[in-house]
Image (cartoon, rainbow, N blue to C red):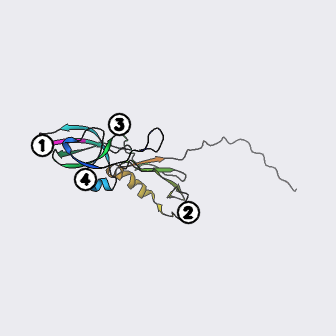
């Protein structure tokens, strides 16, 4: 989660349990590969569907949309060895950028919300292209408006949160009488 004195970093120690042992608050990965790729979810709710199947509601630990998975009770899943306060994980609705009007100076933040240790990446629109806001000049990759719209459309499925921050619009000043001074005559 965050690196602050109020919330010290707790190491993630993945271990396997059965789906029947999962409780709300568990940091959860469906497979060992998901755990290795740091693709975690917080279990927000469990519900028995039948004697053999349990439904778990999952949300990315840094915020995102919920999705449900039906799991057989004996299925082996991976938990991180620590619990998260379910009420502290924000429910973030995806922002549609299909109709958004982009202007130079706009900012876009992208956060891989399924990774509890992820850092937010910021892009700034300059010269009609999106450039990663970084101090390194070697990062010359630019993204088009179409790519940014695709990122936003795929965000919920990929466990990413994309936010568009439009550049503030300045109010036009009232045009009053102008005084022109001509020198040298």
Q: Earlier in the sequence, mark 4 or mark 3?
A: 4
Q: Nearer the viewer, mark 4 or mark 2?
A: 4
Q: Earlier in the sequence, mark 1 or mark 2?
A: 1
The residue under the point 25% across, 38% down is 23
Q: Are marks 1 and 2 in contact (CB under 8 Å)?
A: no
Question: Which range of residues does the magenta coloring cover?
Answer: 49-56
From the viewer's perspective, is residue 148 above or below residue 85?
below
Foreground pick, 113 / 65: 113
Q: Earlier in the sequence, mark 3 or mark 1?
A: 1
Q: Earlier in the sequence, mark 4 or mark 2?
A: 4
If the image is split into quadrants, where does the N terminus sit?
Answer: top left
Q: Earlier in the sequence, mark 4 or mark 1?
A: 4
Residue 131 in the magenta stretch? The answer is: no
Q: SS at mark 3?
A: loop
Q: Which residue is mark 3?
A: 85
Alpha carbon separation for disc pair 3 and 1: 28 Å
**Label 2 packing within 10 angstroms: few (<14), some (14-19), many (20+):** few
Q: Nearer the viewer, mark 1 or mark 2?
A: 1
If the image is split into quadrants, where does the C terminus sit?
Answer: bottom right
Q: SS at mark 4?
A: loop
Residue 137 image label: 2
The residue under the point 75% across, 45% down is 178
Q: Which residue is mark 4?
A: 31
Q: Which residue is mark 1?
A: 52
Q: SS at mark 1?
A: loop
Alpha carbon separation for disc pair 4 and 3: 22 Å
């Amino acid at each position: 989660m965050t690196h602050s004195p109020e919330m010290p970093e707790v190491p993630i120690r993945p271990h396997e349990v059965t789906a029947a042992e999962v409780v709300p608050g568990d940091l959860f990965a469906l497979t060992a590969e998901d755990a290795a790729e740091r693709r975690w979810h917080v279990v927000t709710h469990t519900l028995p569907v039948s004697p053999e199947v349990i439904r778990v509601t999952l949300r990315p630990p840094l915020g995102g949309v919920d999705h449900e998975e039906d799991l057989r009770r004996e299925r082996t899943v991976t938990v991180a060895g620590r619990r998260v306060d379910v009420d502290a994980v924000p429910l973030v609705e995806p922002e549609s950028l299909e109709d958004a009007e982009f202007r130079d100076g706009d900012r876009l933040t992208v956060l891989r919300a399924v990774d509890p240790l992820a850092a937010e990446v910021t892009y700034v629109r300059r010269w009609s292209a999106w450039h990663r806001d970084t101090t390194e000049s070697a990062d010359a990759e630019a993204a088009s408006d179409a790519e940014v719209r695709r990122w936003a459309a795929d965000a919920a499925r990929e466990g990413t949160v994309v936010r568009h921050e439009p550049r503030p619009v300045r109010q036009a000043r009232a045009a009053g009488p102008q005084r022109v001074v001509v020198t040298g005559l």
